[in-house]
Image: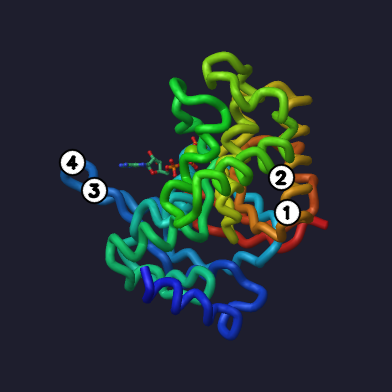
Amino acid sequence: MNSIHHISNNTHSTAENNIAIFNAVVKKYNMDGYQFTAIKNAKCTIQKGEITFVYGPSGSGKSTFLNILGMLDKPDEGQITILGQDVLSMNDNQAADFRAQHIGFIFQSFNLIPVLSVRENVEFPLLHHNISRHERRKKAEYYLESVGLKDYINRRLSEISGGQRQRVAIARALVTTPALVIADEPTANLDSSTSNEIIHLMLEMRRQFDTSFVICTHNENLLNKSGQLIHIVDGKLKDAGDSQ
Ligand SMILES: Nc1ncnc2c1ncn2[C@@H]1O[C@H](COP(=O)(O)OP(=O)(O)OP(=O)(O)O)[C@@H](O)[C@H]1O
Ligand SMILES: [Mg+2]
């Protein structure tokens, strides 16, 4: 823990405007008898406080890219720097601590816990942080209010709608105030007005908390929002620059 905290205090000198840098990153999957290269020599810089949209055809490598960025999976080659840290040199415990401290996830299968209340779901990631029960509760309520769920905090997860669950997932991803939030198809299975609300909410969160978002989507409407675009085709990253 200490070494991670110590190192992360030094990030500003090395990564002022960047949240993450990929250099020559390669990811291969082993399939019976042969290797499939899902990410090919990826180079990119993800800017701090930006919303970066990752888009491309189905099977092009978007989720693989997000999993690697979120340190859920390791590449076979290359270097990755997140918040100025060489994350591939960390051992598993260091990587898990770093992830819990700095990265929030909004994934398609929400990973929420149905038997817990809305508030308990949002408090959950704070159990890894050294704060009091009272403080956990206050933080969870604050973020739930920010996502418009003030009146639902004591409901069980099974008693709210899909769009509301997605908001719970967003509150949970933000409650630890991570520097980076990674969202894989955050609006999949939502109707267009709910998905627009969710996107506006993330834009608002970014304004309020200077959070960097990396969002993978098929949704063409989202790509019209200003931000960085990363186009992935057949495992190759084409950094499309800014969309504005
Ligand atoms: N665990 C795995 N083992 C083997 N191959 C995999 C594995 N996960 C993904 N792949 C393959 O790697 C490629 C990239 O998959 P990935 O899930 O990253 O695509 P994607 O762009 O997220 O697609 P979608 O838009 O459908 O979610 C695909 O060809 C996929 O079949
Ligand atoms: Mg995917």
Can residue 42 be seen in the rendering of this structure?
A: yes
- Of tags 1 and 3, the one toward the viewer is 1
> What residue is shown at x 45% (from left), y 72% (from top)?
5
Q: Is 25 positioned to the left or the right of 137 in the image? A: left
Q: Is 32 positioned to the left or the right of 62 in the image? A: left
- Of tags 2 and 4, the one toward the viewer is 2
Q: In the depicted view, which residue is nearer to us: 14 or 138?
A: 138
Q: Is 109 positioned to the left or the right of 175 in the image? A: left
User: Would you name the residue on which mark 3 appears?
Assistant: 30
Q: Are marks 1 and 2 in contact (CB under 8 Å)?
A: yes
Q: In the depicted view, which residue is nearer to us: 224 or 136?
A: 136
Q: What amino acid is found at the position of numbered circle 4 in the picture?
A: Asp
- Whole-number angstrom distance, CA of label 1 to CA of label 3: 37 Å
User: Would you name the residue on which mark 2 appears?
Assistant: 202
List the single residue furthest toward the bottom.
13
Mark positioned earlier in the residue sequence (2 or 4): 4
Mark 3 Cβ inside 8 Å of ligand 1: yes
Q: What amino acid is found at the position of numbered circle 1 in the picture?
A: Arg
In the rendered image, which quarter is residue 229 located in?
Answer: bottom right
- Whole-number angstrom distance, CA of label 4 to CA of label 3: 7 Å
In the rendered image, which quarter is residue 157 located in?
Answer: top right
- Structural crowding at the residue carrying mark 4, measured as other residues with C-alpha within 10 Å and reported as few (<14), some (14–19) or many (≥20): few
In the rendered image, which quarter is residue 118 located in?
Answer: top right
User: Would you name the residue on which mark 4 appears?
Assistant: 32
List the single residue furthest toward the top.
159
List the single residue furthest toward the right.
244
User: Would you name the residue on which mark 1 appears?
Assistant: 206
Task: From the top left corner, tell me how far across and down residue 120 is, in percent.
Answer: 51, 32
Mark positioned earlier in the residue sequence (1 or 3): 3
- Structural crowding at the residue carrying mark 2, measured as other residues with C-alpha within 10 Å and reported as few (<14), some (14–19) or many (≥20): many
- Whole-number angstrom distance, CA of label 2 to CA of label 4: 40 Å
Q: What amino acid is found at the position of numbered circle 2 in the picture?
A: Met
